[in-house]
Image (cartoon, grey):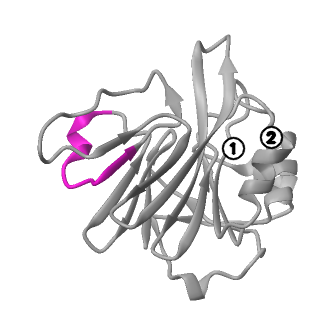
Amino acid sequence: MVITYQGGNYFKIQSGDYTILIDPENQRSFRGAQVVINTVKPTFSEPLEGEDAPVWIENQGEYEIGGVRIHGYSTGWNEKAKCENTAYQILFDDISLVVLGHLYNELDPKTISAFTDNDIAIVPAGGSPFLEITKIAKLTRQLEPGIIIPSLTEKPHTLLKELNREATAEEKLTIKKKEIEEKAMRVVWLKS
């Protein structure tokens, strides 16, 4: 699996010819993607139509597309931003990923419980207007992922300090399931 960061909360996750996009910002990036997942609704771009269009996911629920399992959980409505948010758990290439997305509210215990068995967690690390960094750090410690990938920031130094972790910036994360140390909470800071 290869994960690249495109800025904001926009990630590209690939394994072989299969591509999942998280919160893409325009339709140009849809080419070759099988799935587009949006953590915020209304979204930043509109779905494509037609035979080659990727499957568009923007709501909570359970999905299975081409052997990839996706489960979306509502994280609530944000009155200030006028949007509904969804966090996702994705089982892809034998790796379980949690994408918290544009998280404004604390997660309920049931959702936290669903997310505790994961390999990689993509967490918002930009602070305001999203959930405070201290609460993100607390949530991340509860989830105990093998790998943490900060999103919604160019410099995750505050999150690193809260987690008492270090990280160097990398262009991409190329990883296999057997290379992920369970509950290690290793931070991988991807440059956009």
Q: Is residue 100 above or below residue 68?
A: above
Q: Which residues are magenta?
A: 26-36
Q: Is residue 163 left or right of residue 74?
A: right
186 or 118, nearer to the observer: 118
Which residue is label 1 attached to?
125
Q: Is residue 177 above or below residue 163?
A: below
- Specify whether residue 79 is in view: yes
Q: Earlier in the sequence, mark 1 or mark 2?
A: 1
Q: Is residue 130 above or below residue 181?
A: above
Residue at the farthest bottom position: 178
Q: Amino acid at mark 1?
A: Ala
- Residue at 65% x, 70% y is 119
Q: Indicate the position of residue 164 as horizontal and vertical percent values.
A: 86, 62
Callout 1 secondary element: loop
Asked if disc 1 and disc 2 are in contact, CB closer than 8 Å, the reply is yes
Quarter of the image where the N terminus is located: bottom left
Q: Indicate the position of residue 159 as horizontal and vertical percent values.
A: 77, 49
Q: Amino acid at mark 2?
A: Ile
Q: Indicate the position of residue 33 as horizontal and vertical percent values.
A: 26, 53
28 is within the stretch colored magenta: yes
- Residue at 56% x, 38% y is 60
Which residue is label 2 attached to?
133
Crowding at dot 1, Cα within 10 Å, few <14 / some 14-19 / many 20+, comes out as: many
- Number of labels in the image equals 2
Callout 2 secondary element: helix
Crowding at dot 2, Cα within 10 Å, few <14 / some 14-19 / many 20+, comes out as: many
- Specify whether residue 158 is in view: no
